[in-house]
Amino acid sequence: MRLSFLEPLDRLSTSIVDGLCDPARRRRVAFILVCVYAAAWTIYGVIAKSSQDINADMAEQVVWSREPALGYPKHPPLLAFAVKLWFTVFPLADWSFILLAAVILAAGIFLAIELCGIWLDDEKRATVPFLLAAIPFYNFLGLKFDQNGTLIPIWALAMLAFMHSLETRRPGWSILTGIAAAAAMLIKYWSGFLLAALAIAALADRRRGAYLRSPAPWLVALVFSVAMLPHIIWLFHEHFPPLTWITTRRSSYAIADFSRSLGEYSFGTLGYVTGALALVTFVIRPPPEAVRDSWFAIDPARRAATLLFWTPLLLPIFVAAVMRVNLLSLWNTAAFNLLPVMVLATPLVKMSRSTAKQVASIVIAITAIVVAVSPIVALAKLMTGVENDAAYARLAAVAVENTWRETTAAPLRLIAGPFGLATSAAFYMTDAPSTYADFSDYLSPWITPTRIAREGIAIICPADDTPCVDHMAALAAAGPHGQRTEVTLARHWLGFAGAAKRFVITTIPPRP
């Protein structure tokens, strides 16, 4: 019975690994593999998240896309543009947003296979997607479409293009390196550490003389600068809002404070890759001397990989110490594309076909189990609750729209309230409103008293959120008489009911 149960899994892993080891068809097999991977995690995401509503950070990208700009209060603008493009093709729905996140992860794994293939061959190369799939950034955490997860394929592409530019010095690879580097920076400034890694790797390479004498690095710099120029102009004009945001939110005011963040950054980062390291330790079983030869290899063949891997992980510690900024391990989401190279590239690690198949079988089995239990995850989230009132956003959107329709015939263009609730509710509203998140002029620079007077605004607060209710009263007192109501909302899922919660809604219609 056990053998018959395992035979389909063994045949599947054998087919995949054999295909990934075949130079004639490995790219085709890798493409099919990541497409299936994206489909599996889309199914998981749609089911597991069906008892809650869209994450506020994801909904924020949609809100930003409704206010086109060259930059936003927290981050550069590229993700807002990408979301705008995606939802011109796909419907504005939870499932299509989860699909986008899964596609990004699949692209990241495919590009990482190509990148690691510079240093790994045959069975070692075939193991790359399965080691990465054991890192939660490439699945669970990556299903949240945000700046961190979307950097995974962009960083892999930048490193891949850079290595080919360094090797061939062809203009096409240099242009692609510049585009990818600029895209990374236009998603999140943390990518400055990627730029540092590329520069250090180029200067430390034995081919640096020929590379620097060629047009290649200067073409990279030119393309990057041209792509970044509009945003840089915006930064100076607006007085660097994203930098203000990070220094305000993550400033370290004491050595103990920074030490705690450094501990979380270090051990948290290690914790995220524990699954992949466990596969290496207990399945691949490298000898002790191979471990010593893996992580800090400085021989010419592996020096670039070592620098590209470690620079974005270690350099932030020194920069943060100087700037007195607390670190967060989640910011390292895009830093592990080269982890398989770190653990497998040493010639002291011997990888057999059967070992590669065993790694593949374990990861495939775990993925299948995770997808199978997704309904249980959804039920658990319903019963335990989720942050930022994410269980109530869709219901709140309906309640606010109904109250607004009773107040005025004008379209609902603005909604105010706590960041998480107002932003997620705006995602579901038919009039595609912008938000006045946390009643903050900084978070919502598109909101002005003139716009509120011209378009009106709806406000929703949890009934027990006193500061929010106070802001609501202040706005209502300054505007035309609208409508105030209280509603009790409870999320239902497959016959189960979540906790009920009371909300206060106030509408302020446009001035005549």
Image (cartoon, grey):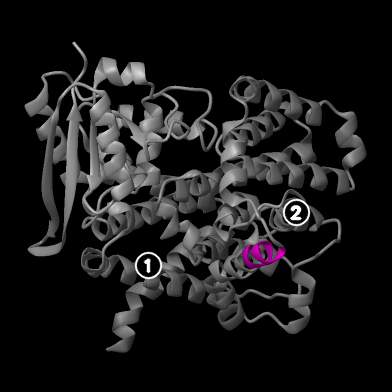
Q: Residue at x 34, y 16 (%)?
A: 450
Is residue 509 visible in this depiction of the protein? yes
Q: Quadrant of the N terminus?
A: bottom left
In the rendered structure, which segment of residues is drawn in magenta?
255-261
Q: Quadrant of residue 232?
A: top right
> From what the image shows, is residue 317 above or below residue 403?
below
User: Which of the labelled discs sits on residue 367, or is there none?
Assistant: 1
Tally of numbered discs: 2
Q: Position of residue 94 (x, y in %)?
A: 27, 45
Q: Residue furthest bottom?
A: 1
Q: Quadrant of the C terminus?
A: top left
Q: Quadrant of residue 474?
A: top left
> From what the image shows, is residue 472 above or below residue 463?
above
Query: Is 257 a magenta residue?
Result: yes
The front one of 134 and 432 is 432
Q: Residue furthest right?
A: 209
Assign a secondary structure to mark 1.
helix
Query: Is 185 a magenta residue?
Result: no
Q: Residue at x 63, y 23 (%)?
A: 227
Q: Is residue 32 left or right of residue 295?
A: left
Q: Residue at x 57, y 32 (%)?
A: 241
- Crowding at mark 2 (Cα within 10 Å: few <14, some 14-19, many 20+): few
Assign a secondary structure to mark 2.
helix
Q: Position of residue 35 (x, y in %)?
A: 39, 50
User: Which of the labelled discs sits on residue 1, or is there none?
Assistant: none
- Crowding at mark 1 (Cα within 10 Å: few <14, some 14-19, many 20+): some
Residue carrying label 2: 315
> From what the image shows, is residue 15 above or below residue 413?
below
Is residue 96 visible in this depiction of the protein? no
Q: Position of residue 287 (x, y in %)?
A: 72, 83
User: Label 2 amino acid?
Assistant: Leu
Q: Could you tell me if the residues under marks 2 and 1 are in contact, i.e. CB atoms within 8 Å? A: no
